[in-house]
Amino acid sequence: VVTLLSTPLKSLGWQILDMQHYVTLMSFLNIGTRKKVAVSMVDAVLESDNVMEDSAQLAKFFSFIQPLMKDTDDHAGEDLVHDKDFIREQQQVAKLVHLIQSDDTDVVYKCLETARKLFGDGGDARMAHTLVAVVNRALELVPLIQAREVAVEAGEDV
C-alpha cells in the first residue's frame, strides 16, 4: 500500500497535489500505514529536489503528510522526545523547508510564514526539530533583502 500511494509522487511530482481524493484515500488507512506513506512521500520529495514555490503548494503538501505534522488522537500525549523514529521523521520534515525557493524574497517569506504556522500546530516536540530550519532559512533571506534594498536605492530594476 505504501509503495502504491507513494509511486504517483515519484512520477508526477507536484501534480499529485491536484489529485482530489488522495488525502481521502489515505484517511482510510490506519495511523501506522499513513505515517509510512507520509515518510515515503517526504523522502521522495527530498530525493527529487523539486522546489516549493508558493505557500498554497506547501500547505497542500503538508496536508498530505499530516501524520508527521500533528499528533493524532490515538498517539496524543506519547513521549516522543526520545523516540528515534520520531526524531528522524521530524528531521526529514525540517529538510523540506530548504526546498522553498523563489527569486522573490516576499514569496519565500510567505512560505516560511506558512511553514511556521503549520509546524506550530504540531506541538512543542515537533517544533524543537522543525522550527530551527525555518529560522535558518529566514536568516538566509536577510542578505538577499538587503541587496534588493540597495539596488532599489541605486535606482536599479529589481
Image (cartoon, helix red, strand yellow):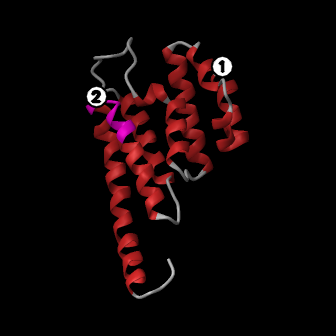
Q: Residue at x 26, y 32 (%)?
A: 124
| Foreground residue among 103 and 67 | 103
Q: Residue at x 63, y 18 (%)?
A: 25
- Secondary structure, mark 2, is loop
Q: Which residues are magenta?
A: 117-124
> Measured along the vertical axis of the image, is residue 93 above or below residue 35?
below
Q: Nearer the viewer, residue 89 or 74?
A: 74
Residue drawn at x 41%, y 81% as measured from the top left: 152
Q: Residue at x 50, y 24 (%)?
A: 35
As for residue 64 lying within the magenta part, the answer is no
Q: CA distance from mark 2 to mark 1?
A: 28 Å
Residue 82: mark in rendering: 2
Label annotation for residue 14: none
Could you tell which of marks 2 and 1 lies nearer the N-terminus?
A: 1
Which quadrant of the figure contains the N terminus?
A: top right
User: Label for residue 1?
Assistant: 1
Secondary structure of the magenta portion, mostly? helix
Q: Amino acid at mark 2?
A: His
